[in-house]
Image (tube, rainbow, N blue to C red):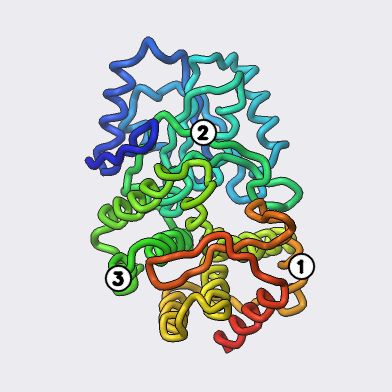
Amino acid sequence: MKEIQADTYSIYLGEEVLHEFNSILEDFQDEYSNFFIFCDENSSKYCLPRLIGLVPMLIGAELIEVESGEQSKSLSICYDVWKTISESQADRKSIVINLGGGVVCDMGGFIASLYKRGLRFFHIPTTLLSQVDASVGGKLGVDFEGHKNQIGLYKNPDMVLIDPKFLQTLPKRHFLSGCAEVFKHALIADVEYWDLITQLDLDNIPNIEDILFRSISIKNKIVQVDWEEKGLRKILNFGHTIGHAIESQSLKNNRVLFHGEAIAMGMAVETLLSKLRGFLSEVECIHILDKLEAAFTLEKIDRFEFSDLLKWMQQDKKNTDGHINFTLLSSIGKAEINVSCLPDEIEDALHKYNFFLS
């Protein structure tokens, strides 16, 4: 078992973490009153049996299940959950365990942090995306009026437990969606890591625990320097300004597009934007695009939706003074933050993205 020390908590990684978790709960029984396990139908079906089997201290915990998917990240669902735990007489010694992917971790932590001014909560992320991204860094929140993560706060969990075995429950599409965040970590911070992951067979990664450790360590190192995203942490937003707009537009149109798929598309467009703005060389731009296209299903973007995407971007929480702000690449392994781009520049990058896929 490996341990990564975050700001105020530890991240434990390995197939033994749940055994250790049960021992911890046995040793500190006086510190909690009851448990709530927050999950969706997928983590309930595929991951809960392993959790309960290895952590018998959780037998009898109350299960709170929400529908999987981004559409559940809403204040109305939070209200329903708060009502449920209130009726179950949750108190300040209750513990919320978030078992699931990014939506479960973001939303479960948000719910726990606001109820009675804060319940303790643990993350047990079960998807690749949540293991390398959503469970690290203290960002919690829900969507509002279709805009991603508009209502939220920063609050660290008490502990994060990452069991690589849960990844075996994922369909291929879900696993590849998580790989987008792994690629992002390499692109913004570690050229050697980029060389490594772009040579892997993503259908069969033999050293997945090493990949998890490296990606989590990259993000954790960044977050420890800048927890509230006032400077360095903004490099983690690469691919997300356009990616979030694509994701929001897809949700609006009831198209099924996973977060990582939208981020992969966003990284491709923002790579082109990096070249257009003079930050990135043409050679590196083409290299990155080729690797992204080889790894992910990049879809063309309907040019009639360009104006809608710009509207989503104009509401992005990273913007300042009415400018659309980006994190762009200056080379593989190095990013530039707070780059304001004009709508014409963004549309040009979108057109060039579609041309690349032609």
Q: Where 133 sits versus 155, above or below? A: below
Rounded to the nearest angstrom, the CA distance separating label 2 from label 3 is 34 Å
Asked if the residues shown at circle 1 and circle 2 are in contact, with their CB atoms under 8 angstroms apart, the answer is no
Q: Earlier in the sequence, mark 1 or mark 3?
A: 3
- Measuring from the top left, give residue 213's x and y in whole percent: 29, 51
Q: Earlier in the sequence, mark 1 or mark 2?
A: 2
- Residue at 39% x, 31% y is 8
Q: Where 340 sits versus 354, above or below? A: above
Q: Three-letter amino acid code at disc 3?
A: Leu
Q: Where 187 sits versus 117, above or below? A: below
- Measuring from the top left, give residue 127's x and y in whole percent: 43, 51
Callout 1: SS: helix
Callout 3: SS: loop
Q: Earlier in the sequence, mark 2 or mark 3?
A: 2
Callout 2: SS: loop
Mark 2, residue position: 155
- Whether residue 14 is visible: yes
Rounded to the nearest angstrom, the CA distance separating label 1 from label 3 is 36 Å
- Measuring from the top left, give residue 169's x and y in whole percent: 40, 52
Disc assigned to residue 308? 1
Task: In this rendered view, identify the residue nearer to me: 23 or 244.
Answer: 244
Nearer the camera: disc 2 or disc 3: 2
- Measuring from the top left, give residue 299's x and y in whole percent: 59, 76
- Name which quarter of the figure residue 323 lies in: bottom right
Left or right: 23 as drawn, with respect to 99: left
- Residue at 42% x, 55% y is 170
Mark 3, residue position: 200
Location of the N terminus (image quadrant): top left
